Amino acid sequence: AQRFADLTGDRANGKDKYGTTCIACHGPDAKGMPSLGKDLTTSDYLKKLSDAEAALFLTKGRPSSDPLNTTKVDMPPKGGNPALKDQDLIDIIAFLRTLQK
């Protein structure tokens, strides 16, 4: 998570990057899609992570074989978009923080 420690998120860019990558599984309102992505607005897992920890998680993803993966659908590293840079990941987290309940 240290590699993200000095980055500050840009919510507007995060919303844009979310819309081109994460939206496919997590939906337009980040409330999840049936049998695909979880609701990120109420995710206790996301809430307990620091921004840097959450961005690091995005770099790794979560394979369907992970016991914590309850959808049993792979979440690929960077949501399957290898073009996302570290700054983009921090920006996505900043955007998601605005949606959390």
Image (cartoon, rainbow, N blue to C red):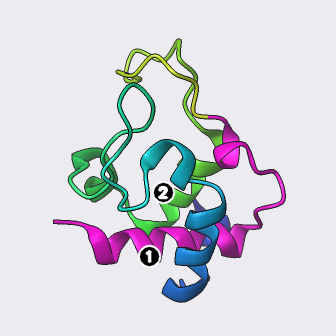
Q: Which mark is residue 56?
A: none
Which residue is under mark 1?
95
The amino acid on which the numbered mark 2 sits, given as a three-letter code, is: Glu
- Secondary structure at numbered mark 1: helix
Picture coordinates of residue 48, whole percent (x, y): 27, 54
Gap between marks 1 and 2 measured at Cα:
15 Å
The amino acid on which the numbered mark 1 sits, given as a three-letter code, is: Phe
Residue range of the region highlighted in magenta in the rendering? 76-101
Q: Is residue 77 above or below residue 64?
A: below
Number of numbered discs: 2
Which residue is under mark 2?
53
Picture coordinates of residue 93, whole percent (x, y): 47, 68
Of labels 1 and 2, the one closer to you: 1
- Say whether residue 18 is magenta: no
The foreground one among 52 and 45 is: 45
Q: Earlier in the sequence, mark 1 or mark 2?
A: 2
| Relative to 67, 21 lies left or right | right
Q: Could you tell me which quadrant the C terminus lies in?
A: bottom left
Q: Could you tell me which quadrant the N terminus lies in?
A: bottom right
- Secondary structure at numbered mark 2: helix
